Image (cartoon, helix red, strand yellow):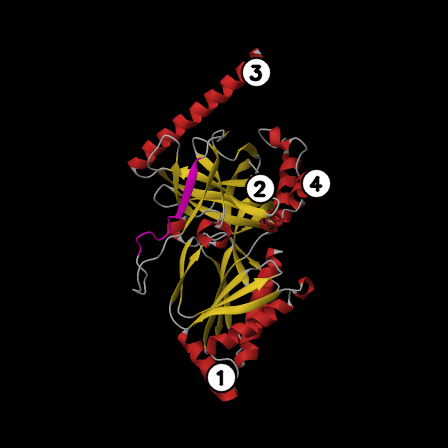
Amino acid sequence: MLLETLNALDQAGVQALQSTCGLDVTGRKISLVREGRQSFLTLGTLRIKGCALQMVHLGCDEQLLGKLDENTAEHGGCSGLNGLAGSFLTHLLEKFDDRHPRGTVENSQESPVVLHTRGVRTFQFQLETDRGHLHFLVEVPSRTEMAIAKGSDFLMSMESIYLPANWHGSDELPDQEAVDSFLAFLKKTEGDVYLEAPAGDGTARMNVGLLVEICQVDGCPAMKLVTDFSDPEAGVPAPGSIVKASVGIGDRSLEFDLDYLAPATHELDSGSLLPCALFSLPRMVSIGQRRRSFRVSVTVPVKVELETALGQGETSPWSDGKFESEKISGQLADLSFSGARINAEGARKSPGFHKDCRVICRMLFPDMDEPLQVQGVIRRSAAGPADRDRWQDDIGIEFIVSPDADRAALDYVRQFVLQLQRSKLAQRLQVTGS
C-alpha cells in the first residue's frame, strides 16, 4: 500500500505540472524527513478523505510561482499555487477512484511557512523543471497504522499466519524458519523497523525503516529497508557494523541485530528512487515486553497533561514570533518505572502527539499540590473506544532523563509503582488466606 501511494503522489505531481503550465519534469528526488521542522516558501494544503492519505503539503520556489502567475495571466483560471494544488488533487484522487475519495485545497499561502514533521514515513518529493521546483511533504500511513486506526482484525490475521502460535509467551523465535516468516510478516504489514545507527561521536541515533524486499547481495540473502543514512549527524554506520533493530507488535518488542552492508535505492514504477539500505538477515530474534519494566494499573485518579516538547522557546526562522506548544489532558491508565499509558482526547488532531514525538508529561498524584513533570517520547498512539458513542486516544510514552529534576521525579514514580505493587500483592494474599 505504501509504495503504491508513493507512486500515485509522484505521478500526480508530474501530471499537475504538465496540465497546469505545460512543464516537463527534468529531475526528481524523494527523501525521508526526520522529526523537526520543514520550511516552505509557499504552501498549499490538500486535505483528503476516503483513502490512505489524509494531508499533503504542496509548495514551490519563486521561479515556479512566477511561471504559474504568468500562466494565470495568459489563460485565466485559478491563480498561482491554488491552480497547481487543485490540479494535483484532481490527478491524485483519480488514482484512488476505486475508494471514492474526496478532497479540498485549503490554507494556500504565498509566504514562508514552517511545518512540524513526525519523522515516521514522512517523505519529501522534489520535482525539477526548467522553470523551477515543485516540492510536497506527506506522511504516508502503513498497512499496520491503517489497520489500528480502523480497529480491523488485519494484524491479528497476519500474526496467526506468519508468527508461531505461542510467540507472545516466548523469549525468542524458535528457529530460522520462524525468523524468515517474521520477515514476511514485516513486509506484508509494512511494520516500522527502528534502527539504532552508530554516530561519529560514539552515540547512536534512531532511524525508522520499512522492509521492501529480500534480495541477493554477493550471492547471500539480504534485507532492503527504506531508510536514509546520508546525514552524518543522524548516524551513518560503516559497512560491516552492527545496527540494533526492533519492531513493536502490541505490547511485545521483537529485537535483533543486523549487519549493515551498503546504501541502496528502490525504484518506484514512476521511475523515482527511494533511499534505502541493505542489511544481512537476522539470525536470532528475541522477544521482550515493549516497556522495559512491568506496568501496574493505576486505580486512583491521576490527571495528566501532555505538552509538545518540540519548539518550546524556539524562535521562527522567519522572525515572526515563537513556536506555540500544544497541550492535551487525560488520565493515567497504567504506570511503570520507565513509562506510562495515558487515556486522552485530541491527540490524533495534532502532529505533536504522534509516535516518536517528544513531550513533557505532568502528572498530578493524589498526595501532591503541584504536578510531577518528566520528559518522554511517545512510543504508541492509537484510538480506542471510551464508551459506546465516544473514542479516546491511548498514548504510551517512554520516560527519558535529562535534567536533575527528571531524576527526582522518576524516583517518585518508582516509589509510587512499588507502593501499588505491594498493595496489590497484599490484596491477593488476603484473598488467598480467606
Say whether residue 200 is left or right of residue 163.
Answer: left
Look at discs 3 and 4 and give the one toward the viewer: 3
Judged from the image, the secondary structure of the residue bearing numbered disc 3 is: helix
* Residue linked to disc 1: 72
Q: Indicate the amino acid at tag 4.
A: Ile
Magenta-tinted stretch: 302-314
- Crowd rating for badge 1 (residues with CA inside 10 Å; few <14, some 14–19, many 20+): some
Mark 1 or mark 2, which is nearer to you? 1
Task: Decide which of tag 3 and tag 4 comes sooner along the chain.
Answer: 4
Q: Which residue is mark 3?
A: 431
Q: Quadrant of the N terminus?
A: bottom right
Mark 4 crowd level (few <14, some 14–19, many ≥20, 10 Å Cα): few
Q: Farthest residue to the bottom: give it.
A: 74
Residue furthest to the top: 433
In the rendered image, which residue does mark 4 sit on?
161
Is 345 placed left or right of 406 in the picture? right
Identify the residue shown where x is 39% and y is 45%: 199
Residue under numbered circle 2: 281
Disc number lying in front (1 or 3)? 3
Tell me if residue 256 comes above or below residue 215 in the rendering: above
Image height of 23 relative to 271, above or below: below
